[in-house]
């Protein structure tokens, strides 16, 4: 009798990455929120200040946005039951596309069901065999996955380094088409992309520029137009991608650019053609949020006021917050286990945040990822700083060698120590986007 073939479910039965954290009461993911109120949520029956959300302008729960979503669902129903290409386009989709194109000063825009699909769909459709996609090493997972599925070849360059980019571009053969892609604001570090220098190098080597404005829309630029606008590069950057899942408080994504490119994507992007159109409620809500973002500029002003307060506050206490320049503030802890424990203690003290571990961040540099909103009150923010200071003392964060010397310690996986081979493999990789390391990264995949 022949041997039974491989059991595809064996890996699920063997999966232990979360078990120890759960057993010790430190598992930080998939927490169920009973009532979201923007700056705070009700979770396990208690009020928690929310500092783990991308609802930068506080628009996700705005009654006018909710009302617009309800109106759309009443008018168009709960779903579009088909692809945009076929039966799924409603007038609201077209109106939102026109509003986005107008806002960003572009010929046209096309909506995708998620930001993830927008990146994947565009990279797959726009590149061909032999083309090069020059990709910042800290770009979002949707870009990395898009590159991996695209016919063009992923060529990583050092984070935010125009020199590293130029070294890669110089070596490309003339026949290679080339596009440089990077996040406008990086989702874990909170860094702003060095777009002027990078664009100069890109243009010197005839490369197109593609900027993912997921975390910069509503945060940077005139009325929240994003990083490209912030640097005055609207005429230089050919492809602008954005999401609705952050400042615009909903879900979905888009690509904006010249009319012919958008026409091409509309008929070639498989992530658009072979999936259902965005639901009416989503489009109605986003359209309203986009209007409010432009009208109520106090939101962006307040977001920056809160951001400055938190940067200063965390630094004053002694936390390392890296090179962030934005409302995303990574609080370095170092050890993964300690980041989990810190997060659990925050939760017990009434603060909702999540840890980020390898490969969402570099190996050995686990953080508590915090992000701030226009609608946080001074009282919220003071309380957050007070609790962080108390916990750093209680947990000895600043005395921990993994904190003082992050990324260089062995055995930081205190929950389940890796065997030496596995650890060396991770270390050699130096924190790139390999699938090595704790499987918990999947729960946090950037
Ligand atoms: C930089 C960046 N790009 C793209 C995405 C994907 O966006 P969406 O949540 O709309 O799929 C995210 C989401 O986290 C992101 O941070």
Image: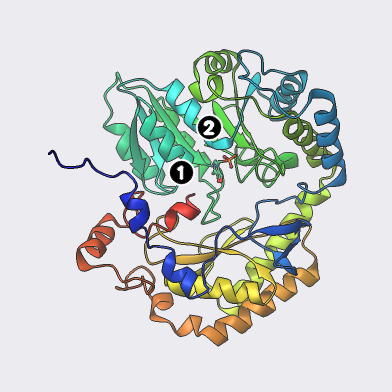
Q: Which mark is residue 62?
A: none
Occupied quadrant, residue 392: bottom right
> Element type at marker 1?
helix
292 left or right of 264?
Answer: right
Occupied quadrant, residue 416: bottom left
Q: Horizontal and vertical percent for residue 215?
A: 61, 46
> Element type at marker 2?
helix
Does residue 201 appear in this view? Answer: no
Asked whether mark 2 and ligand 1 are closer than 8 Å, the reply comes as: yes
Q: Horizontal and vertical percent for residue 77?
A: 78, 26
Q: Horizontal and vertical percent for residue 329?
A: 59, 62
Is mark 1 in CB contact (under 8 Å) with mark 2? no
Does residue 163 appear in this view? Answer: yes
Asked whether mark 1 and ligand 1 are closer than 8 Å, the reply comes as: yes
Residue at image coords 50%, 80%:
397
Q: Earlier in the sequence, mark 1 or mark 2?
A: 2
Q: Which residue is disc 1 drawn over?
A: 141
345 left or right of 363?
Answer: right
Residue at image coords 70%, 29%:
279
Q: Residue furthest left?
A: 1
Q: Nearer the viewer, residue 351 or 318?
A: 351
**Regarding ligand 1, which quadrant of the image does it lie in?**
top right
Q: Callout 2: few (<14), some (14-19), or many (20+) C-alpha neighbours within 10 Å?
A: many
Q: Nearer the viewer, residue 438 or 24?
A: 24
Q: Horizontal and vertical percent for residue 81?
A: 66, 22
Residue at image coords 40%, 55%:
359
315 left or right of 147?
Answer: right
Q: CA distance from mark 1 to mark 2?
A: 11 Å
């Amino acid at each position: 009798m022949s041997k039974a073939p491989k059991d595809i479910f064996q890996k699920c039965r063997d999966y232990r990455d979360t078990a120890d954290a759960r057993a010790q009461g430190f598992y930080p993911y998939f927490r169920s929120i009973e009532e979201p109120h923007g700056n705070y949520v009700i979770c396990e029956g208690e009020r928690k200040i929310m500092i783990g959300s991308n609802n930068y302008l506080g628009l996700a729960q705005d009654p006018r946005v909710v009302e617009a979503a309800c109106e759309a669902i009443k008018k168009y129903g709960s779903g579009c039951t088909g692809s945009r290409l076929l039966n799924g386009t409603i007038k609201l989709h077209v109106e939102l596309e026109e509003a986005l194109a107008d806002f960003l000063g572009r010929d046209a825009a096309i909506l995708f069901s998620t930001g993830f699909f927008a990146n994947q769909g565009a990279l797959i459709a726009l590149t061909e065999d032999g083309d090069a996609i020059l990709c910042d090493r800290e770009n979002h997972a949707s870009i990395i996955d898009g590159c991996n599925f695209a016919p063009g070849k992923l060529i990583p360059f050092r984070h935010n380094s125009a020199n590293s980019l130029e070294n890669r571009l110089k070596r490309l053969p003339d026949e290679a088409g080339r596009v440089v892609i990077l996040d406008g604001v990086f989702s874990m570090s909170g860094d702003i992309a060095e777009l002027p220098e990078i664009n100069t190098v890109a243009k010197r080597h005839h490369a197109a520029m593609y900027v993912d404005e997921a975390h910069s829309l509503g945060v940077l630029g005139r009325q929240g137009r994003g990083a490209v606008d912030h640097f005055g590069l609207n005429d230089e950057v050919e492809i602008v991608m954005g999401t609705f899942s952050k400042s615009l408080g909903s879900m979905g994504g888009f690509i904006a650019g010249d009319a012919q490119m958008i026409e091409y994507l509309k008929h070639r992007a498989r992530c658009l053609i072979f999936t259902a159109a965005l639901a009416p409620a989503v489009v109605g809500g986003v359209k309203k949020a986009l209007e409010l973002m432009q009208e109520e500029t106090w939101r962006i002003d307040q977001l920056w006021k809160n951001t400055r307060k938190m940067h200063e506050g965390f630094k004053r206490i002694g936390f390392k917050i890296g090179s962030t320049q934005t409302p995303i503030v990574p609080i370095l802890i170092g050890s993964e286990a300690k980041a989990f424990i810190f997060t659990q203690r925050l939760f017990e003290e009434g603060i909702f945040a999540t840890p980020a571990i390898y490969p969402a961040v570099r190996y050995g540099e686990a953080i508590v990822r915090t992000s701030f909103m226009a609608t946080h009150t001074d009282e919220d923010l003071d309380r957050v700083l007070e609790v962080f200071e108390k916990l750093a003392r209680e947990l000895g964060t600043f005395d921990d060698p993994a904190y003082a010397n992050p990324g260089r310690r062995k055995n930081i996986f205190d929950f389940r120590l890796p065997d030496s081979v596995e650890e060396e493999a991770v270390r050699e990789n130096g924190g790139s986007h390999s699938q090595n390391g704790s499987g918990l990264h999947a729960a946090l995949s950037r």
